[in-house]
Amino acid sequence: MSEAADRDTEGGDASASSPTPPHRLVAGTAAIDDLDAFLASLDEVADATDAVVQAFDASLIVSATHLGEATRLAARSIGRGEAVARDPGVEIMLYAAGSRQIDRALSLGVEEGRSRVVVLVANFGAVRGADRTDADLDAAAESVADLLDSPATGAFEPAFDRERVTAFYDIGEREREATAGGVADIVRERVALLDVEK
């Protein structure tokens, strides 16, 4: 089980200093025969622990920071009453995708078959407007790990698919050449710029 990016910012008002809600990343391999059943199991974990639980295709996630920043910005958006989605998990996906289109954001999610996944579990209990109680992140992370065919140990180690990432985020050769950083930096910029594009 991976517990990378456990950002324990105590309390906090999402609309003021925009703290990142406490969260964990649980990575590994999932063998998903029935997508609806797998997502229903994640919903059960969320209901039992009060955590926000959102699964991502690990090949499209460039770093723990990618999801941490998406979580922070989603919490801020909810705190300000500006969220596009009613579900905090979907709002996180919108930021992670750098898009205001829910259908596009959902394509960052998991699919049937055997693949690498990373599941975010977050505590939005202190986020104004989220209408959540404090979550049991330990229990949520353990329950999610139990759903994976082969959970990873240690911190989340991204191993994204560069070709899929550049296609998903529409990163052209010219943009890569003009940027001092790499593809991961461009993706994080897309996440940050979503607020500007609202």
Image (cartoon, rainbow, N blue to C red):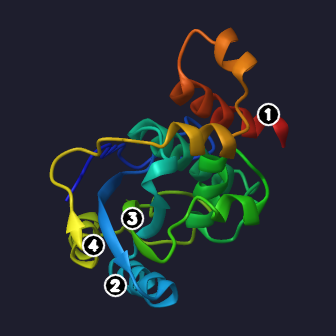
Name the residue tied to disc 4.
148
Amino acid under disc 1: Val
Q: Position of residue 32 (x, y in %)?
A: 40, 80
Q: Quadrant of the C terminus?
A: top right
Residue beneath label 2, please?
Answer: 48
162 with respect to 115 (left or right):
right
Given the image, on which type of amino acid does mark 3 rest?
Answer: Ser
Q: Which residue is mark 3?
A: 115
Q: Residues within 10 Å of mark 3 (few under 14, many from 20)?
A: some
Q: Nearer the viewer, residue 169 or 81?
A: 169
Picture quarter containing residue 82?
bottom right
Q: Which residue is mark 1?
A: 196
Q: Give the distance between the C-alpha atoms of the residues marked 2 and 4, in whole angstroms.
A: 18 Å
Mark 1 Cα shell of 10 Å, populated few (<14), some (14-19), many (≥20): few
Is the residue under label 4 in contact with that under label 2 (CB below 8 Å)?
no
* Nearer mark to the viewer, of 3 and 1: 3
- Taking the view exactly as shown, the residue that stands out farthest to the right is 198
Q: Residue at x 73, y 38 (%)?
A: 170
Which part of the image, by quadrant, shows the N terminus? bottom left
Answer whether residue 19 is visible to the viewer in this image: no
Spatial separation of the CA atoms under disc 4 and disc 1: 36 Å
Residue at 46% of width from left, 88% of height from top?
A: 34
Residue 83 is drawn in which quadrant?
Answer: bottom right
Instruction: Give the mark nearer the N terminus: 3 vs 1.
Output: 3
Dot in front, 2 or 4:
4
Dot 2 or dot 1: first in sequence order is 2
SS assignment at label 3? strand
